[in-house]
Amino acid sequence: MLLGYRYGLCNRGKLNCLIVKVQLISEKTESADAVIIGAGIAGISAAYYLAVKNGMRNVVMIDERAPLTLTSDKSMECYRNWWPGPNDHMVCFMNRSIDLMEELARETDNLIHLNRRGYLFVTGDKDRIDKIRDTAAEISCLGAGPLRIHEDGSKTSDYAPSPAWGFENQDSGADLLLDKQIIAKHYPYISHEVAAALHVRRGGWFSAQQMGMYMLEQVLDHGVRILKSKVTGIALKSGRVDSVHHQSTDQTYNVGTDVLVIAAGPFVNKITSMINVKLPVLNELHTKMAFQDYLSVVARDAPFMIWDDPVQLSWLPDERAELESDESTRWLLEEFPGGMHFRPDGGVDSPILLMQLSYGLDVVEPVWPPQFDPFVTDILLRGMIPMIPGLSSYIGRMRRPFVDGGYYCKTSDNRPLIGPLPVQGAFVIGAFAGYGQMASQAAGELLAAHVVGHKLPTYAEAFFVDRYEDSNYQETVDQMQDKFGQL
């Protein structure tokens, strides 16, 4: 017999209070109006917008792991509407997703702890200011909100940081701070070598686990069933999806359906290969660290902070000599890419900072559990020091940093795949490249619109699988290279 798991929550949305209700499924063959493969945030959001928002009752989800446990619980849990072109599709898509997150926060008395502290992009290179200004003006024109430039000195500027908590009635757009006095006044822990800071306002973070578990509770209340099982095959009939085969222990089961949603995260091509479809995605392993700022170097009301400049790690002379002497560690003396970022985690009494840097991003085949670079804690701490010099106090004095991470499944243009596949009845939702949590609401809504036949939003065309068949678009992608907004 197959175990069909039903998940309930005590104290609403707290993961450590998960209650499992076991349902025995004796029939080897059943049917469903839709089958969703994958119970991460993409799959759960698809189920939420199909079952809860569109009334589809007979929905089955299949995953060999517990919900929200492969990459969905490895997120930095941040969001922003600040995305580059070449058009306004990503900005419109994220604005819609944030609108839906804010609606959910209002409906639940902000169960998801949504804040709007924003993103603060910081540079110490004055030669980059013109480029930052031009890029900010471009993104502003795409619909991200007005750009305000502060360069007249702290006495005349009306700039103020975002409130630490809440999200209502706050500024949109961005503030470009070009006066060191303004930056030092509001962010005294930032390096005095700073040249400029861009404060993106419609951004911040939230509890992704609370949001995911709330949606999970809702879909279960609307009749969605989750099967803890491994998908082994997909049968077609006359070129259309006909059934999904899955295996639990030594038994094989079938679910008949003519609607299949593939939300398999980094394993998406493993599933699509069952219908002879290969998607243009690759996987990178990204790592984050939970770090105890027990000396209170960074203010607890800090925004999400990003150092835009490349960095050389801070090593003591004897450390540098030791690293130089060993070919396997010499790479630690090289320049690391810009994009080092962190944010406070928890309440005012929490000492935790979450840190991340994307480096050494080789294309990999996903494995479970992932293996992390043994040098990552030193890389993250020392890489933050050019932005936050006070963190140098922790060299050799870190208290039990915790490392985890997950796979970024991404396309060459760093945009998702949402919509129909070449096989009739099959759909995909994925390739979120580190922004799956912030995109999940609009992505689930868009996926459901494709399935039930609703009118599609204007940004839908940007996420079709066949966009790469357009030679003009592919040329644009090649020209953009690494300018698609990945941190």
Image (cartoon, rainbow, N blue to C red):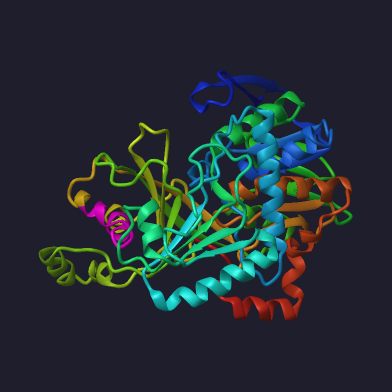
Query: Horizontal placement of 327 versus 173: left or right?
Result: left
The image quarter containing residue 282 is bottom right
| Residues shaded magenta | 380-392
Magenta stretch, main secondary structure class: helix
Residue 29 left/right relative to 434:
right
Q: Is residue 136 above or below residue 110?
A: below
Q: Position of residue 148 (x, y in %)?
A: 57, 62
The answer to whether residue 215 of the structure is visible from this angle is no
Q: At which x and y percent is residue 419?
A: 77, 56
Left or right placement of residue 351 versus residue 226 in this view: left
Which residue is painted at 65% across and 59% down in the image? 144
Look at the picture and state if 140 lies above or below 36. below
Q: 201 or 425, which is in the foreground?
A: 201
Could you tell me residue 388's position as x and y percent?
31, 56
Q: Looking at the image, which is closer to me, 308 or 289?
A: 308
Q: Residue at x 76, y 76 (%)?
A: 470
- As drawn, the residue found furthest toward the left would be 318
Residue at (45%, 55%) from the top-left corner?
A: 286
Give how far across and how far down residue 467 sits, in percent.
75, 69
Relative to residue 120, is residue 478 depicted above or below? below
Residue at far front of view: 156
For residue 275, say whether it is visible.
yes
Let me know if residue 384 is in the magenta part: yes
Q: Is residue 242 magenta?
A: no
Query: On screen, 373 above or below 21?
Result: below
Q: Residue at x 68, y 35 (%)?
A: 104
Q: Identify the image quadrant of the N terminus.
A: top right
